[in-house]
Amino acid sequence: MRLKKFIYFLLAFLILAGLNSTLWPEIRKEGSPVTMILTGDSIITRRLSVYSEPEFLKLIDLIRAADVAFTNLEILFHDYEPYPMHESGGTYLRAEPALARELVWAGFDLVSRANNHAGDFGVLGMELTTKYVEQAGLVHAGVGRSLAEAREARFLETGKARVALISCASTFPDHARASKSRDDIPPRPGLNPLRYSTTYVVTAEQLENLRNLLLAWGLNPPRESDQLMFMRQRVIKGDFPEIKTTLNQDDLAEITAVVRNASGLADLVIVSVHSHEQGRDRFSPASFLVDFARAAIDAGADVVVNHGPHVLKGIEIYKGKPIFYSLGNFIFQNETPLRLPQENYEAYRLGEDKHVADFNEARYSSDRRGFPSQPEYWESVVAQLKWKGKALEEIRLIPISLGFGQPRWVRGRPVLADPQLGKKIIENLRKLSASYGTVVEFKEKENIGVVILPPEHP
């Protein structure tokens, strides 16, 4: 009798649950479109949620509406418990821990951590940032208590897709690099490194001139050789001057193994690379970065997003998958940290009576040089992707302005670009992408760019 009552109760519950979808989890529909937002560097030192301009809130709504939203977290969160390291990634970057929640307010849920500022305040600074990032609910990758942990993929669970993130960096102070452990010594916490070697190619005449210079300095270079070592760099003879960069094969093998693993555990795989290195100019990627991005896609990545140089670089569609060689800046509030360590002031011969504003004046010569003097650092795009399964259906490029020419306490926060600036940004990106065979069109009515996908793709 009791068994019958239980069965009747169970059937009644299942019927009610079927009528009320809030009591019964919806089964994910295979092939449901997934929207993804990708942005470049976020150096956040001030709140976002206090602003209400329409062109700012429209951008925030766009990010919030995405199923997946990613940015590179190029800041540390702590209350100055850790001391600064002897070397930083440039300016020592730190922000109030509460600002981690501002990124969540803006709609982000995935952040990369491997970048040249990850080690500015040592291991403790990294660990405190991890604490506040996780408390805010952000999924993060790229740093860890060991090399294995720094390399591993992290996963975002959504109602439409499981998304993996792998984060690495080629630009960093060496002390920030994570290490492997041995049975007799613990690993070093740090970031996931993507190392490379550089070879400088010069003509025969230039190599001979360099040899004579070394002789004049009292050094003893090899007399009959097609290569020399100069300032710990390899210089070889070639037909014309160029710089060659070659991936570290151990790093390449280990990172692509993680990508392959992630591709078997997630619907979509994002690989993030922080790289300041350049090719023929600051708007082109170093050759090793091109090699790595393509290798990552060969290993199973669905999209590779690079950041670091703070300017836009071109877009490549490789085997149907997008490579963004740099998405520039998204938040660029590097001029408004609360404090800076003595090392930053000493670099500009500033005494102890000087503070952050004095440092900015000396570094940028009252905005006449460096980042504040060049508009390309303050003009960028937000990439909006649409996927159906593994198929890339659409790439829209939303032009944004970070306030070039505004006071330093104002600039650095993104808003949608006006039509004139939007057209300029997309036109620049069109030219930068053309060398990869990528076609970018400006849609004047919508004030956006659109990547024309190859014919074999939707």
Image (spheres, rainbow, N blue to C red):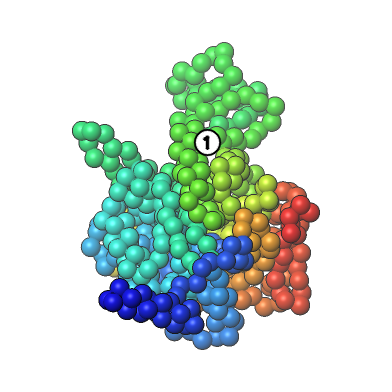
At which x and y percent is residue 429?
69, 60
Instruction: Name the side, left or right, on which 446 lies relative to 57.
Output: right
* SS at badge 1: strand
Please say whether residue 232 is visible from this viewpoint.
yes
> To which quarter of the image does residue 409 belong?
bottom left
> To which quarter of the image does residue 57 belong?
bottom right
At which x and y percent is residue 200?
57, 32
- Foreground: 399 or 23? 23
At which x and y percent is residue 295?
58, 41
Mark 1 Cα within 10 Å, few/some/many (few <14, many 20+)?
some
- Foreground: 457 or 238? 457
Q: Residue at x 24, y 59 (%)?
A: 82
Numbered disc total: 1
At which x and y percent is residue 340?
33, 63
Instruction: Name the side, left or right, on which 156 lies relative to 236.
Output: left
Check disc 1 and report the residue beneath it.
247
Outermost residue on the left side: it is 184
Q: Residue at x 65, y 44 (%)?
A: 280
Please say whether residue 338 is visible from this viewpoint.
no
Q: Amino acid at mark 1?
A: Leu
- Foreground: 441 or 426? 441
Quadrant in which the C terminus is drawn: bottom right
Outermost residue on the front side: it is 1
Quadrant in which the N terminus is drawn: bottom left
Q: Residue at x 64, y 51 (%)?
A: 321
Q: Residue at x 50, y 58 (%)?
A: 163
Instruction: Name the side, left or right, on which 281 lies relative to 61.
Output: right
Is 40 rendered above or below residue 217? below
Is 334 rendered above or below residue 210? below
Outermost residue on the top side: it is 224
Outermost residue on the right side: it is 455
